[in-house]
Image (tube, rainbow, N blue to C red):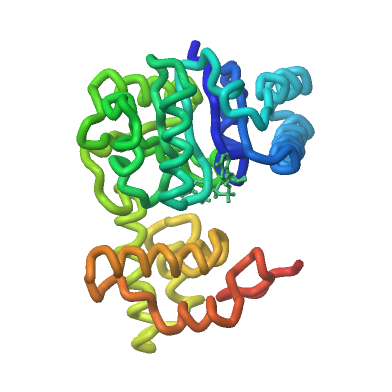
Amino acid sequence: MTTLAVIGAGSMGAQIAQQAALHGIEVNLHDTGEGQLRKARTSNEGHLSRRAERGRISESDAREALERVTTTTDLGEAVSGVDFVIEAVFEDLEVKRSVFHQLNLLAPRDAVLASNSSTMGFSKLAGVTVRPEMCVNMHFFYPVLVMDLVEVVRGPQTSDITTERAVALAREMGRTSVLVNREIDGFIVNRILHAATQEAYRLLDAGVASFEDIDTAVEKGLNWPMGPFRLGDFSGLDITYNARLHMYKTTGDERFKPSPQLAAKVKAGKLGRKTGEGWYHYEK
Ligand SMILES: NC(=O)c1ccc[n+]([C@@H]2O[C@H](COP(=O)([O-])OP(=O)(O)OC[C@H]3O[C@@H](n4cnc5c(N)ncnc54)[C@H](O)[C@@H]3O)[C@@H](O)[C@H]2O)c1
């Protein structure tokens, strides 16, 4: 069984660690501050106790899964003796490069170094290590405790063995993986989502239909659980906006230019559920 270190205990890292622990994997969870680690533990305790209350897991399994996650602010301690590291720190190239540089020095030489980056060209991280063949992107989806998919993305130098180890870890964690054979912006899911969302915004901006009706059409006609506007509110409209801006800047393709109506929402601080209002209104 794999031993795992997860670096960064934010929204993604905390749940990646917990998902692995639910499947029997011993995990060291690292962040720079004790406060963030406490927050991650409290959040995971909440998720698992709700599962136990609903009878989806026994109280003892929930307790054991929580105990399998050891937290530490010491990076060296976190990666000592592990087989696999998943990095989930801020989406900032310099922060990630610095973390990968340290992981290369501190993690066992045979450990795979994976990143959960959504947008970063992964070779930019692998390039700071002396083991680019052992680096891979494992793109989990939020919320990790619920979403079944992991996109395993090969960098130009990722070896077959490393790819197989990433696929095997996803399986061990009870997750379905798909293989993306080369680095490409947005991987599979976000490219398809961006294309569909862009069309939804084009229809809205052209006055063809209201956002409510576009959501209803997509939910009832395509059987998607959420239409593009409801999904935008759920993930945060700033995230949707920044993702589109990133695609627009990197491809120069006008099709990705953020909609003026989306830009106006972000400028007004109406970011969706987290601010109480986005396309829809939410009770605080
Ligand atoms: N949020 C999503 O929906 C989502 C989905 C898929 C992938 N991702 C990717 O996951 C990664 C993390 O995203 P998130 O939403 O969890 O971010 P977040 O801001 O919630 O968490 C980032 C965490 O990293 C920690 N951190 C920062 N620098 C660090 C360092 N040097 N060492 C250790 N910890 C450090 C921070 O303290 C914070 O707890 C990003 O690369 C993002 O692109 C996010």
In the picture, residue 45 is in which quadrant?
A: top right
Q: Image quarter for residue 28?
A: top right
Q: Nearer the viewer, residue 20 or 71?
A: 71
* 156 sits left or right of 52 in the view: left
Q: How many labels were placed on the picture?
A: 0
Can see residue 126? yes
Asked if one can make out residue 145 in the rendered structure from this viewpoint, the answer is no
Measured from the top left, where is residue 172 in percent x and y? 47, 20
Up the image or down, 56 lies above or below 234; here it is above
Q: Residue furthest top?
A: 1
Residue 239: image location, x then y, percent: 49, 63
Identify the image quadrant of residue 72.
top right
On screen, residue 237 versus residue 61, left or right, reads left
At a point 59% along the width and 82% down the height, the residue shown is: 268
Residue found at x 58% / y 71%? 271
- Left/right placement of residue 133 relative to residue 229 reads left
The answer to whether 160 is drawn above or below residue 212 in the figure is above
What residue is at 30 percent from the left and 56 percent from the top?
A: 191
- Of residue 107 and residue 70, the one placed in the foreground of this image is 107
Q: List the single residue furthest toward the bottom.
A: 207
**Quadrant assignment for the C terminus:** bottom right
Pinpoint residue 280: horizontal percent, then vertical percent: 60, 74
Closest to the observer, 170 or 123: 123
Residue 254 image position (x, y, % from top left): 24, 76
